[in-house]
Image (cartoon, grey):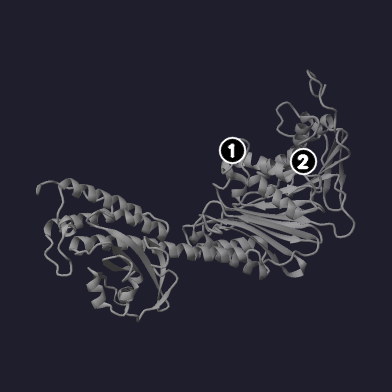
Amino acid sequence: MGGERREPPADAFEAELHQIEALNRMQAPGPDPALPPGPDRATRASGTPEEDRRRDSLLLTAGHAVAAADTLDEALRLSAGLYAPEFPLDGQCVFGVADGNLTALAQYGFRPGEDGRGFRMPMNTGYPAAEVARTGRAVYLASPDVYSRRFPATWHISAHTGREAWGFLPLVTAGRVVGVWLAAFRTPMEFTAGERALLTVTSRMIAQVLERARASRAELELSRGLRRSMHTAGEAPTGLSVATRYVPTGGGLMVGGDWYDSIDLPNGRMAVVIGDVQGHDVHAAGLMAQLRTAVHAYAAEGHGPDAVLARASRFLTTLDEDRFATCLYIEADPSTGDLHIARAGHPHPVLRMGDGTCVLKHVSGGLPLGLMPGEEDYPVDTVRLHEGEILMLCTDGLIENGGHDMYTGWVRVRDALSPGPADDLEAMADRLMAAILTPGPGAREDAAARDGDDIALLLLRRDAVHARADLSGRRLVLTVGQDQGEGLAGARAELKALLHDWARPDQVDTAVLLATELLGNVLVHTDQDGALNATVSGETGTRRLLVEVMDRGDELPHQRTPGELASSGRGLLLLDILADQWGVRPEPEGKTAWFALNEAAPAEPGEIPGL
């Protein structure tokens, strides 16, 4: 078969097994005075081609399994699959090297107490594993006589274990001995070149498992420390309450790239932050820790929300150009309830009003942090949080967890956030997380929604400082800037959400149309921003909607009759036809156009709305 062409091996382990096969073909074992004659020796010296193929297949399968093991115990259990009549592997132990001592980390095949698990042995001890750790060279002991002659001081450790041969091999990673693997055999061994090569390959695989196990422990300690640090935020100032939750679901660590923070600012203000670094690995967790620290520092220096995000974006670029992060930063004034919000590619916040109505609060935004250096532009929106209202900030894992998309996930969040009183913010956070992480109807009991991204949640409530606030009404306040025409879509969506339970859907459409006309009139005919204030008052079924749109322009609008092809001039005409009441009033600075709609009874079957 010398001319047979062989395909290249699939991986390193398979390549080294080919080398072992070549060594076995080239070498016929000679007599070894330490190995007594007998049938075992003859059996190991030769085998039929079918036996050789079976052995090679067994070794290859076991080798691949060992390379993929997650723990040392699993690796040793899989290594036991290397056993064959000519290779009677009977016991294994892995010793770790640290602080000048050997410690037993894992074992397989030993009876309790045989492996010395839990012992600490100084490196200068006359023990085979200690010599291997010191020199980095393997030690092969072919028989009890060889063992007792070479290591008389510690021979008693293995004298009564029933083994007849031992191999001690270094576990090396990055050129450093990090451990020693003991392979014990039930009969004397020659340790031929092929057998030594097989043990060497296996030790390399076990070394990789040991390194992964240590890296996993280091990652776990890192993530635990980061998670503890997220619970060290200061107390919220009087007038504001904060509840937070963090659930790692996607990356397997205690913490990933998601984070939240609350920061004490000068003049009694507070900043709240939520963010998400791309990825679920330990690198994302490390970047998150650095970015979180940077945001905290920029905020403490007194920068505004836009400047904090711009600086954080440039900072992230210097750390890792291949990763980006989303972030939502809010500077809150507890005395007024004003929230100054800047957003970097992050999901919009959710506003829960006093009566439980929830709306997506559309705010302006810029690109995610670190995505396009030099393009850091983060507009700041101002939202007023009234007493009893709650603003929910979250990462996308809360919305999309469990296979939901942004729409169905938002509906699930809204349904969990709306009911119940808002007095106990912690209970509200628990209820929301339970709704997200509990399997839906018909799902398996073990199918908890933990298959998505990590989840970070922050609830910010404005509290009543003195008398209890009246929670019977609803109010929506928003601003659409001159350069933010796309904000009209957000305003329409928020007004629809405000009227989600209005008796007549056609009145909701009317309200949205009229509000759009008033805001559009401000953007088109003035150089000012448009501010909308919508209030719902009264009992369900007889409620009244009042919508006011304010601007700082001096010119008062006047009603006219537009031509058939006119592109404007219909706003006040629509108000006159569709609104129950409307008007325009001058203000000390600018003017306010307003309209009111009274809730009508639900339409009867077959009734045409409006007739």
Of residue 94 and residue 546, the one placed in the foreground of this image is 94
Q: Judging from the image, what secondary structure is the residue with disc 1 in?
A: loop
- Using the numbered discs, state the Cα–Cα distance from disc 2 to disc 1 in whole angstroms: 33 Å
Q: Nearer the viewer, residue 123 or 154?
A: 154
* Image: 105 above or below 81: below
Residue at image mark 2: 498
Is 532 left or right of 314, judged from the image as shown? right
Question: Is 453 on the left-hand or right-hand side of 303?
Answer: left
Q: Amino acid at mark 2?
A: Leu
Please name the residue that numbered disc 1 is placed on: 443
**Direction from residue 301 to residue 286 in the image, left or right:** left
**Mark nearer the N terminus (2 vs 1):** 1
The secondary element bearing badge 2 is classed as: helix
Examine the image and state in which quarter residue 92 appears: bottom left
Asked if residue 66 shows in the view, the reply is yes
Q: Nearer the viewer, mark 2 or mark 1?
A: 1
* Amino acid type for the residue under numbered disc 1: Ala
Expressed as whole percent of the image width and height from the top left, the position of residue 495 reads 75, 40
Q: Residues within 10 Å of mark 1 (few under 14, many from 20)?
A: few
Q: Give the vertical position of 516 relative to 390 (above or below).
A: above
